[in-house]
Image: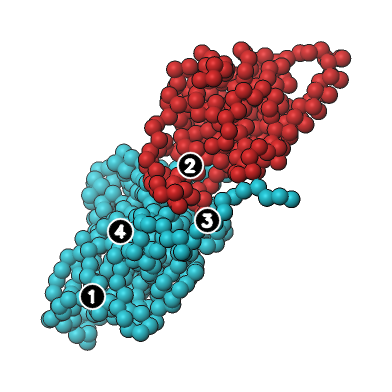
Chain colours: A cyan, B red
């Protein structure tokens, strides 16, 4: 349940950054367009590593020995990204030659409710307005060509680091976009598996952006699809894309969650809260209850679901209560999948996939089986599964009844 | 749902409460000799404009709103309620329902309000609550699962109901009797024990009670904040609070 509080009524604006400075008057005269176009000349100190790399790359182009990429043999296709927990249209087995998959993501900053019960909210930093960012799917050997756009009304600089990519800090060094800017990055998917991606502007801004929702997953499928240990094909009917998000929401002296007028206003408070390493919320898909009740995931007995679990920052141990992980890829798709798993592991800073075929109808809880996180911090999703009950697998032989003492 | 026990007298409180009441009576007895039977009628809450008449013919006098944070804290300030409640800066204690209350907490309040006012307030039974709320509650949605093997999951709600945020009193519906917010985001403790198959149970050892709200729920007597998720199937109540009823006109 990605809920936005009056996103149009309360747009992120740059005024708070400028307020109280001499720039305010100048900005009023020059107009925001001029302000947005003006690039900060001095990079942040914390950002110096990727900055220098960017510069180094830029300087080299005049005398570069790097050969231009050979794009012959590639077919250009567009992938329409969709909101979690859904997956974009894709082939499980690649047909035709390698592709250049064009995608577009906007770095939007939005006020989102994290827990409706308490009113806890966060100025989320997002890719395409959702937490997690959209799932991107390609095949090994394809290229992903991302247009990254930072809307004019953003407060902050953003970029993206694809763990699936190779070089330039995962693309982080080549994708810094300020409000009003866009850039295009192309990278080749050479390693099949599920990988996280996230914003990494530099220094403490990296965890700040990541713990404000700015992360998601790429799934790089083998060209001939998923296989079991014996090489038999494994196919799924649907994908459930789950992003585990740890939030560290600042509280006032009474323990109430603080509210802020604009994205970035919580920066100092957030850093103090993050330093404790204890999340106030650890949820699936952006908010408590985002994948339960009305928003529960749906399936039928006999259907196979591939659960793609992204956890950019914290370790997680997903468990499907009442079911199993028939096949689990914690690492790459080239490794033989784990099988018959009760609980599997998603290393913080990675994404993993688990495949399960439902055998019983009912409600399944997909939880972080650190149950404190699952039950008290929000790390729970539900599958509602239709079908015929199988009494061989389970039957209530005697209902609860008093017994003689 | 457990047996309907609408005809039970007002004194059917938990043994915990009874024990408290006995203590209270003893203390009051002593106090009467020097203080007199002085009751503070300013503590009597606003009741609904009309008494409720149940299908059994029984008359029930019901508090118009849920007990507020301000009312609760008076109990706390007088040393009779353990829990101190706070409101957020954007809330008014006088109009914000008292929430985060366990069954144990609400029995403390009951003992106090009855001692201080001389009235005999109690919690409703589940059937009483359901009846006074019927006019404002939405129709029951079709169960997600109907197969008898699936009763364990049949209460799962895939329909979005009331928003879960805590709102000031009067933000939700008012029944024809003038009772407000029965369909709100606060679930109200009843004294109906949820004892499973073992039937009638000593209330002092009752592990869980029904709470009145938009959907039926039973809560462990210890729970103050029904967190969502985990093994609990379905959507738990958002907030736990209380509303007083009486068998006698106030």
From the top left corner, tell me how far across and down residue B96 is, in percent.
53, 29
Residue annotated with mark 4: A86
Q: Secondary structure at mark 3?
A: loop
Depth check: give the residue in front, A343 or A252.
A343
Tag 3–tag 2 contact (CB < 8 Å): no
Badge number at residue A117: 2
First-in-chain label (3 vs 2): 2
**Is A166 drawn above or below residue B164 in the view shown?**
below
**Is A385 drawn above or below residue B90 in the view shown?**
below
Q: CA distance from mark 3 to mark 1?
A: 42 Å
First-in-chain label (1 vs 2): 1
Q: Secondary structure at mark 4?
A: loop
Residue A405 in sight from this viewpoint = yes
Q: Chain of mark 1?
A: A
Identified at 83% across, 15% down, the residue is B32
First-in-chain label (3 vs 1): 1
Q: Which of the 4 image quarters holds residue B21?
A: top right
**Is A146 drawn above or below residue B59 in the view shown?**
below
Residue annotated with mark 1: A93
Depth check: give the residue in front, A220 or A68.
A220
First-in-chain label (4 vs 1): 4
First-in-chain label (4 vs 2): 4
Residue A288 in sight from this viewpoint = no
Label 2 Cα neighbours within 10 Å, binned few <14 / some 14-19 / many ≥20 = some
Residue annotated with mark 3: A396
Q: Secondary structure at mark 2?
A: loop
Question: In screen coordinates, is A358 left or right of B243?
Answer: left
């Amino acid at each position: 349940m990605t809920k936005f509080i009056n996103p149009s009524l309360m747009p992120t604006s740059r005024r708070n950054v400028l307020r109280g400075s001499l720039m305010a008057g100048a900005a009023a005269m020059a107009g925001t367009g001029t302000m947005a176009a003006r690039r900060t000349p001095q990079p942040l100190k914390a950002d110096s590593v990727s900055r220098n790399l960017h510069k180094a790359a830029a300087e080299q182009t005049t005398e570069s020995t790097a050969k231009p990429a050979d794009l012959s043999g590639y077919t250009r296709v567009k992938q329409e990204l969709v909101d979690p927990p859904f997956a974009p249209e894709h082939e499980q087995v690649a047909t035709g030659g390698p592709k250049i998959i064009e995608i577009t993501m906007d770095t939007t900053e939005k006020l989102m409710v994290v827990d409706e019960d308490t009113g806890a909210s966060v100025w989320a930093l997002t890719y395409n307005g959702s937490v997690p960012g959209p799932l991107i799917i390609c095949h090994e050997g394809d290229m992903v060509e991302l247009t990254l756009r930072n809307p004019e009304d953003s407060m902050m600089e953003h970029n993206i680091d694809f763990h699936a990519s190779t070089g330039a800090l995962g693309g982080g060094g080549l994708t810094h976009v300020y409000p009003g800017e866009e850039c295009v990055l192309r990278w080749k998917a050479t390693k099949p598996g599920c990988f996280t991606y996230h914003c990494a502007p530099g220094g403490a801004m990296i965890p700040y952006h990541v713990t404000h929702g700015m992360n998601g997953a790429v799934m790089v499928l083998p060209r001939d699809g998923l296989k079991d240990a014996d090489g038999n094909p494994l196919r799924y009917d649907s994908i459930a894309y789950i992003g585990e998000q740890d939030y560290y929401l600042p509280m006032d002296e009474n323990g109430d969650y603080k509210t802020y007028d604009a994205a970035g206003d919580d920066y100092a408070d957030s850093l103090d809260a993050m330093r404790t390493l204890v999340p106030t919320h650890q949820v699936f898909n952006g908010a408590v209850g985002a994948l339960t009740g009305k928003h529960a995931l749906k399936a039928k007995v006999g259907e196979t679901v591939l659960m793609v679990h992204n956890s950019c920052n914290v370790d997680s141990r997903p468990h499907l209560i009442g079911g199993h992980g028939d096949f689990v890829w914690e690492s790459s798709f080239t490794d033989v999948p784990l099988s018959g798993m009760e609980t599997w592991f998603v290393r913080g800073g990675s994404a993993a996939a688990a495949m399960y075929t439902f055998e019983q109808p009912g409600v399944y809880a997909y939880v972080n089986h650190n149950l404190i996180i699952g039950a008290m911090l929000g790390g729970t999703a539900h599958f509602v599964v239709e079908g015929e009950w199988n009494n061989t697998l389970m039957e209530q032989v005697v209902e609860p009844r008093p017994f003689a003492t | 749902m457990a047996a309907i026990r609408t005809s039970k007298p007002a004194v059917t409180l938990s043994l915990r409460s009874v024990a408290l009441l006995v203590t209270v009576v003893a203390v009051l007895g002593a106090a009467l000799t020097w203080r007199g039977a002085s009751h503070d009628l300013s503590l009597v809450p606003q009741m609904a404009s009309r008494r409720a008449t149940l299908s059994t013919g029984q008359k029930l006098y019901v508090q118009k709103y849920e007990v507020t944070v301000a009312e609760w804290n008076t109990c706390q300030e007088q040393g009779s309620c353990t829990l101190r409640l706070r409101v957020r800066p954007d809330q008014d204690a006088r109009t914000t329902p008292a929430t985060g209350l366990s069954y144990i907490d609400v029995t403390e309040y009951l003992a106090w309000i009855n001692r201080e006012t001389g009235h005999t307030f109690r919690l409703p039974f589940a059937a009483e609550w359901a009846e006074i709320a019927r006019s404002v509650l939405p129709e029951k949605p079709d169960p997600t699962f109907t197969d008898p093997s699936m009763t364990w999951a049949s209460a799962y709600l895939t329909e979005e109901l009331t928003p879960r945020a805590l709102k000031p009193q009067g933000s939700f519906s008012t029944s024809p009797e003038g009772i407000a917010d029965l369909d709100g985001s606060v679930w109200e403790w009843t004294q109906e024990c949820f004892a499973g198959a073992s039937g009638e149970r000593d209330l002092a050892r009752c592990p869980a009670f029904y709470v009145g709200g938009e959907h039926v729920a039973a809560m462990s007597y210890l729970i103050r904040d029904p967190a969502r998720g985990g093994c609990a199937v379905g959507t738990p109540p958002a907030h736990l609070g209380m509303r007083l009823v009486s068998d006698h006109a106030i």
